[in-house]
Amino acid sequence: MKTNLLEQIFNNFNKIIIDENDNNIIKDIKNSLSGELLMIILLNLTVISKKLENLVLINFENIPEIYPDVVSSIHNPNCSCRGKVRKYFSRNYIICKDIFLKILGDPGVSEEQTEMIADIVESHLQKLNSYIKEGLERNLDLSGTILEIANNKEEFYKTIQKIKKLEQFYIGISIIENNDKLKLYFY
């Protein structure tokens, strides 16, 4: 049964890989969701047990450019490094998905744990298909975006509600007040 789950996860992971025939909108959606998906898997695996956390760390210690951020993001839920890890996962999706497949194939990962991850991957695939079907032409990841809005509570509330409705994501916001304007720096 675990073999079937791993095959299902592998096939679903591959559906998220950017294809050269994808248009820019689909590429952006796949890029954003791939990093988000792998980050969720990372966090889920590391809270299940110390053994799985160690397995994750062992598999990422050979990638020195992201390893310290992976360690920090596991141990500090409020760490801004989670954004770095998610972006790294997006940019290096194929390599990172292969690491997660190797982890999930380890005999120390139970069938129940593998099934939980399979459900997470399936839900993200459904989200991807929904975004593509709806043809949402939007940037899901606001990291690095700067918005300038009127300096009032109503405008700020309206902007945040729009971001939530579009299911855009970011790690945090820095706000600079300049008289009648607010500059929102998303990271």
Image (spheres, rainbow, N blue to C red):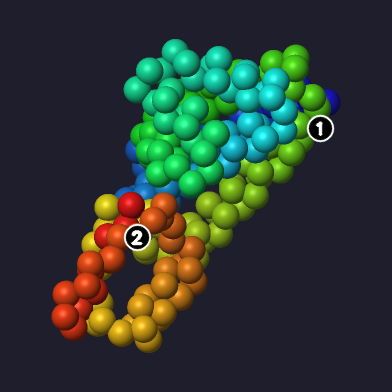
Residue 157, quarter of the rendered image: bottom left
Which residue in the structure is indicated by mark 1? 112
Left or right side of 62 for 152: left
Q: Say if residue 93 shows up in the picture.
A: no
How packed is label 1: few (under 14 Cα within 10 Å), some, or many (20 or more)? few
Q: Please report contact status of discs 1 and 2: CB closer than 8 Å, yes or no.
A: no
Give the residue displayed 62% in from the left and 18% down from the top.
Answer: 55
Give the residue displayed 38% in from the left and 18% down from the top.
Answer: 64
Label 1's element?
helix
Which residue in the structure is indicated by mark 2? 173
Q: In terms of depth relative to the viewer, which is nearer, 122 or 96?
A: 96
Left or right side of 62 for 5: right
Give the residue displayed 37% in from the left and 50% down from the top.
Answer: 28
Is the residue 127 above or below the residue 175 in the image?
above
Q: In terms of depth relative to the viewer, which is nearer, 37 or 146?
A: 146
Q: Of all residues shown, which one is farthest toward the left?
A: 179
Left or right side of 153 for 6: right
Give the residue displayed 74% in from the left and 38% down from the top.
Answer: 116
Label 2's element?
strand
Q: Say if residue 141 shows up in the picture.
A: yes
Q: In terms of depth relative to the viewer, which is nearer, 77 or 97?
A: 77
As shown in the figure, which amino acid type bears the numbered disc 2? Ile
- C-alpha span from label 1 to label 2: 37 Å
